[in-house]
Amino acid sequence: MSNSKMFAQLLPSLRLVPKRSASPIARHVRCYAKPSVAPLPASPARLVQSPMRRSPWSTSLQTRTFSASAAVSHGHVDPPTPGEELYVTFIDKEGAEHKLAVSKGDNLLDIAQAHDLEMEGACGGSCACSTCHVIVLDQEYYDKMPEPDDDENDMLDLAFGLQETSRLGCQIVMTPELDGLRVKLPAMTRNLQSSDFK
Ligand code: FES
């Protein structure tokens, strides 16, 4: 085939090649001006977001989840092992005595709540209220206890009817040295977490 015939056959296809812009800069700008990928169409499946990614401006249908974990129970104590019981006596607001057999390591808040004695424990034993206030009746036992730390002393300062041997029940852990402990529940407690700020 001659060169002129070949050129004549190729000419139509050469015309289909798009015309290039005048300058490389113009091509570059056009490249950024036009999105190369079209946005995906909105569909109900794409609009449902997980709770972690929710936007306050979103108007789409959304699902919420909530925790189904077990609530933390307070006041749970295990019965003492036979032969290893320790004894603590609570004297309630009416003057009634409750002598209880407990295990080493239990604290007075958990013991009182497990036996339905009136001890609120508003902060759950985190030393942030004074509603577990007790008065240790025997100085001998009071002296056997570890000294109250600064947090406990701060809360005790807020306790109603504070006495020399006052302690927070949630901070007193039963040990063999405290076997036979006797404590009195005060006539009332002061809950600074709720009622005093209403
Ligand atoms: S329960 Fe709050 S300080 Fe003991």
Image (cartoon, helix red, strand yellow):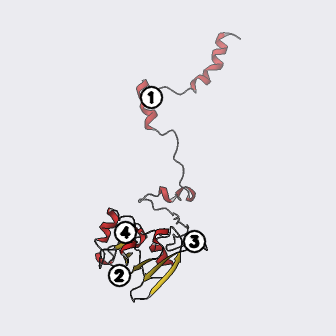
Q: Indicate left or right for 152 with 60 as reference.
A: left
What residue is pinned by disc 1?
A: 27
The part of the image, by quadrant, that contains residue 30 is: top left
What residue is pinned by disc 4?
A: 143
The front one of 67 and 37 is 67
- Residue 45 visible in this rendered orientation of the protein: yes
Image location (x, y in percent) of residue 136: 37, 76
Q: CA distance from mark 4 to mark 1?
A: 88 Å
Which residue in the rendered view is the most extreme toward the front?
Answer: 140
Res 116 label: none
The part of the image, by quadrant, that contains residue 144 is: bottom left
Q: Nearer the viewer, mark 4 or mark 1?
A: 4
What residue is pinned by disc 3?
A: 84
The tag earlier along the polypeptide, 1 or 3, is 1
Per the image, label 3 sits on a secondary structure element best described as loop
Q: CA distance from mark 2 to mark 3?
A: 29 Å
Q: CA distance from mark 4 to mark 3?
A: 23 Å
Is disc 4's CB within 8 Å of ligand 1?
no
Res 186 label: 2
Residue visible at 50% across and 26% down in the picture: 19
Per the image, label 4 sits on a secondary structure element best described as helix
Per the image, label 1 sits on a secondary structure element best described as helix
